[in-house]
Amino acid sequence: MTVYTPRRAARVLLVDVSDRVLLFEGSDPARPGHRYWFTPGGGLDPGETPAAGAARELAEETGLRLAPAELGPPVWAETVEFPFDGVWYRQEQEFFLVRVPSWEVDTAGFNEIERATMHRHRWWAVDELAACDERYYPDDLPAVLARALGAGVSPAGDGGAAC
């Protein structure tokens, strides 16, 4: 029987003016060959709201600093079970949509584990993801993204390749 560690997280669908979403490529230290793409975000600190955690993670992982209120309401939520570094997690996570005209990603805020396991980043179009053989999470990211983009969320702040 698998014992799960409970975890709450917040993630960000960071989307540019061309409707491309920013994803990071990472790997699991316990399974180095298991590479995958995922959205910015991560675990919440004790007492932290999902919006505050999403804003903090966005700043740490991309350099984009927004107030939690600028994120708006979550556009999607899920519970997912996964292993990372030999630990099985049951993670409840909420996704926020943030639109920007463009963004130059700054990873200077990565912590030690992020520096070791996050290898590169890329902006992906929904159709590229749908046609791609690469692994990404969540598994239904193209559908989640298409629904979120259909909601018409406006850009944040002052305005804000194939497989």
Image (cartoon, grey):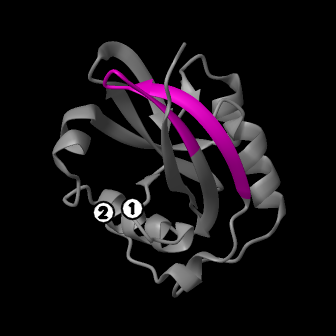
Front position in the image: 62 or 57? 57
Disc marking residue 57: 1
Whether residue 15 sits left or right of residue 37 in the image: it is: right
Is the stretch drawn in magenta largely helix, strand or loop?
A: strand
Instruction: Write down the residue under mark 2.
Output: 60
Mark 2 nearby-residue class (10 Å; few <14, some 14–19, many ≥20): some
Q: Which residue is at 45% across, 66% downward? A: 53
Q: Position of residue 14 (x, y in %)?
A: 54, 59
Q: Quadrant of residue 16?
A: bottom right
Callout 2 amino acid: Glu
Q: Which kind of residue does numbered mark 1 sit on?
A: Glu
> Which percent across, then down, holds residue 48?
45, 71
Give the left or right position of residue 9, taking residue 147 as reference: left
Whether tag 1 and tag 2 are in contact, CB under 8 A, the answer is yes
Q: Secondary structure at mark 2?
A: helix
Q: Which residues are magenta?
A: 76-91
Q: Is residue 105 visible?
A: no
Q: Residue furthest left?
A: 112
Residue 92 pos. (x, y %): 60, 48
The relative height of residue 61 versus residue 132 in the rendered view (above or below) is below
Foreground pick, 57 / 22 = 57
Residue 21 lies in magenta, yes or no? no
Considering the image in quadrants, where does the C terminus appear? top right
Q: Taking 155 as reference, is 27 above or below it?
A: above
- Nearest to the observer: residue 27 or residue 128: 27
Q: Residue at the location (33% across, 14% down)?
A: 31
- x, y percent for residue 113: 22, 40
Give the residue at x 38% y 63%: 45
Residue 1 as seen in the image, left or right of residue 104: right
What's the mark number on residue 162?
none
Q: Residue at x 63, y 56 (%)?
A: 94
Quadrant in the picture for residue 59: bottom left
